Image (cartoon, rainbow, N blue to C red):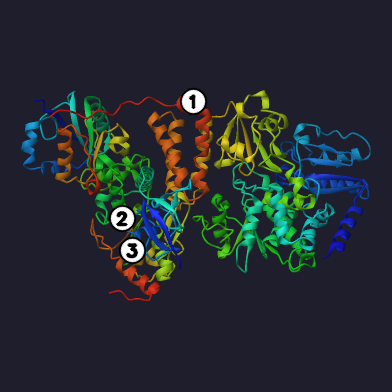
Amino acid sequence: MAALTLTIDGKPVSAPAGTTVLEAAQDAGIRIPTLCHLEGVYDVGACRLCLVEVAGSNKLLPACTTQIAEGMEVWTDTDRLRKYRRMTLELLFAERNHVCSVCVSNGNCELQALAWEAGMDHVRYPYQHPQLEVDQTHPLFGMDHNRCILCTRCVRVCWHIEGAGTKNVAGRGADCRIITDLNQPWGESDSCTNCGKCVMACPTGALYYKGVTTGEMVRDRSKLEFIVTAREQKQWIA
Amino acid sequence: MDLNQLLAIKEKELASRKPYTLRVCTAAGCLSAGSDQVKKQLERAVAEAGLSEQVEVRCVGCLRLCCQGPLVHVDPVNELYQKVGPETAPALLERVRGGAPPLEKGDLQHPFFTRQFSIVLANSGVVDPERIESYIAADGYRALHDAVIEMEPREVIQAVMASGLRGRGGAGFPTGLKWSTVAKSGGARKYVVCNADEGDPGAFMDRSVLESDPHSVLEGMAIAAYAVGAEQGFIYVRAEYPLAIRRLRMAIEQARRLGILGSGIFGSPLNFNVELRIGAGAFVCGEETALMASIEGRRGTPRPRPPFPAESGLWGCPTLINNVETFANVPAILRNGAEWFASIGTEKSKGTKVFALAGRVKNTGLIEVPMGTTLRTIVEEMGGGAPGGARIKAVQTGGPSGGCVPAELMDVEVDYESLTRLGSIMGSGGMIVMDETTDMVDVARFFMEFCKDESCGKCIPCRAGTVQMYGLLTKILEGRATARDLATLEELCDMVKHTSLCGLGQTAPNPVLSTLRFFRHEYERRLRPERHVASAVQPVTG
Amino acid sequence: MDRLKLATVWLGGCSGCHMSFLDLDEFLLELGQRVDVVYSPLVDAKEYPEGVDVCLIEGAVANTDHLELLERIRRCTRVLVSFGDCAVTGNVTAMRNVLGPKNAELVLQRAYLECAQDNPMLPRAEGIVPALLPKVVPVHEVVPVEHYLPGCPPPADRIRAVLEALLEGRAPALEGPQLKFG
């Protein structure tokens, strides 16, 4: 594959053709915030946190799905991008019921971490307070829709790493829900293999191991990494 | 099927024409006013009067002045009768006998009709949409024949390019360029897709074309398939158009039976089949990548572009997606020549545009005008102005993605660029007239509510942003908002516009931005003063 | 040297932020030299005075008393600090909002009628027991606020960083993990 050169934040970077801007940035040690991106599953460009400015384009482009081009000039951390990222996070916090103080993922949450990184000290939009359910019917795992940000990582992991196809998205707009099979209680699922990959993939406290309490939910993403590396690079990593 | 057979069908059809024709509009508008009963009563009256050899009662498509339906056009006297009821319809036979039927006559000399220039709607109201022979008698499928027999695919593309035709779905992308890209994309399999999802509230242009002249769309798609190298076509039509769906099904079946769709069309190497795919009530499925996902049986949500469908579309194959009206223009372009088409319209926007004129205007209905016609001509001359002599305030174009043009600027020539310069868009053709009783903030909120309800939910700015913008607009309408709230709304509009994944979110702020630009006072007069002000200065003690 | 006039209140909060405030330990002695605590649950003041420099507001706005007090606080104070997650986001106090427009009635019924063992009765005392607001909101949805101090509770060192900045006439600049909710 031909290697292309581009600059990211003024820094010259080179990467093979076909690489995404996000991958090229990661390889060069440049951090672009993401939420719907998960190593090993295809990217959907949904959260819009990874939007970058590209010279010559008046559109902001999602780094996770945009392929690099020769001579591309990318800016990842401008005032405008920081403003939009903060607004995106505030919209998320206002959309559902994210009460960090009583959440199993308090302190171990990607949404929470992105918020303080972005300097979010409060949410300027009115909280919507939708009434959402908690599904505790599965013997091992719980799903709290109050904390779900609809990143669909659980869905993609279930379909493309485990291959079970249990999790899906139903509804439209703010009425979207992550559902199990034909919108059944998780405990009644015929297709769920109890592998727990969805729980591993979840960035917030929406999916969790039953029995953990506030702040105790810790994830081991390395298991997902292990499977993806085995599959894509035909290597077992210790 | 070869040219001789095609011409024979045409001749036979023309020979069967009778001295008098009563063309009854059976498109959705007139149908909902009972025109099917009108047609039945007319047929009965003709039979009873023994006039079956003299009078043809033909079901046709849209006769344009929808507000006056049911409409019946009488040939050869060229008279239009409006508000024809099933009981009064038989009186039309008076006209055949040389008398004057006691029925309301439409004024065919009114600018509403005389200012129209029919290309897309040329057959609408003339041919019977349920009979392919009627279409062929109007030179239907001649262009397809000539294209596949006498032209190379690249010559077809050149013709479309030279015509200057631009996508009629709203974006106005040069059609020839799109066809050329698909033609040049590599791959054994390619697709042609017709976007008939027409979701804009108040828009009924595509619906009318499909109900009135479905074959023109099929012919356009077949020509496109030949040009780009596709063998399979899909028409994605919204489920809320049952009549259009029925007529499309009939048209496809009739075309297949005559060998005009299928293998070896007109004896050429072109194979082309068309299937329908019916929508399920989602506006977002009018967005091309969501539409393709829906055809593939997946959840109808958009995906980032690039890659564009021309490169990678249905099942990863190069796919040509065009709007109904775009395809409907193609046969005429090939029949009459690219220069002919390019001689109509403005420098950058060639040809005509179909508009669904609605709202506070006397003459609501379907119009097709050359690009470059001014809004004032359309609304005041053709539309007859607002009922009751009310003052027109604004004209909304482009549906939930568009904006309002204030009355003072109605001399704008309607074309892609000039409407965009005014903060609106051409859109698919919805045109809603508003008068002094219209509350512009309410208009903005109406469209925001629509976008909020139709958002697919995939990306955060649209899913959550439309909810917040709707909340702010409601707060403003209810007099509870302050200047800070208005500033928050404007900030959100900017963010949602620039960060949303697809056109739905990207254009959802347009009605707000447009009404703020031209009617800001309607927002500001509703604001209440801040009760408190935060300190600008830090305490300096201790 | 003018001492900073400091006030603290707890509205719809658990007072945990105030306990965290007390965790300032020895710094409280230094603070005592530099501020006048003119109103606080920790001192004996009956009425919120005028001319307050800084007020730390704990708790969400949940009943009519909170609303009244908050309006007075804003009028009489130069700098407001939303103190703790309840004030900044609504937090646990606002969780009743999900029950819909009748959430106030529902929680009262559940607490005082359904779960009561003896003498189930809704508390009612005109002029004494304030009415619950139909929606619990963070402080900044009622009055503009100058600074935010998130946390549940904010740890003492975070509180100290904010107080020190205000004492020195600077705007507090919390960043990174110091902004963590929860």
Q: Secondary structure at mark 3?
A: helix
How busy is the neighbourhood of tag 2: few (under 14 within 10 Å), some, or many (20 plus)?
some
Q: Residue at x 26, y 43 (%)?
A: C93
Q: Is residue B357 visible in the rendered structure shown here?
A: yes
Residue A163 image point, x, y percent: 43, 70
Mark 3 falls within which chain? A
The image quarter in which residue B482 lies: top left
How busy is the neighbourhood of tag 3: few (under 14 within 10 Å), some, or many (20 plus)?
many
Q: Amino acid at mark 1?
A: His
What is the tally of numbered marks visible in this picture? 3
Please, is residue C129 above or below residue C110 in the view? above
Q: Secondary structure at mark 2?
A: helix
Please, is residue B429 above or below residue B279 in the view? above
Mark 2 falls within which chain? A
Q: Determine the CA span between mark 1 and mark 3.
A: 51 Å
Is circle 1 on the same chain as circle 3?
no
Q: Determine the CA span between mark 1 and mark 2.
A: 43 Å
Please, is residue B376 above or below residue B17 in the view? above
Numbered label attached to residue B521: 1
Q: Which residue is identified by label 2?
A: A110
Q: Secondary structure at mark 1?
A: helix
Q: Determine the CA span between mark 2 and mark 3.
A: 13 Å
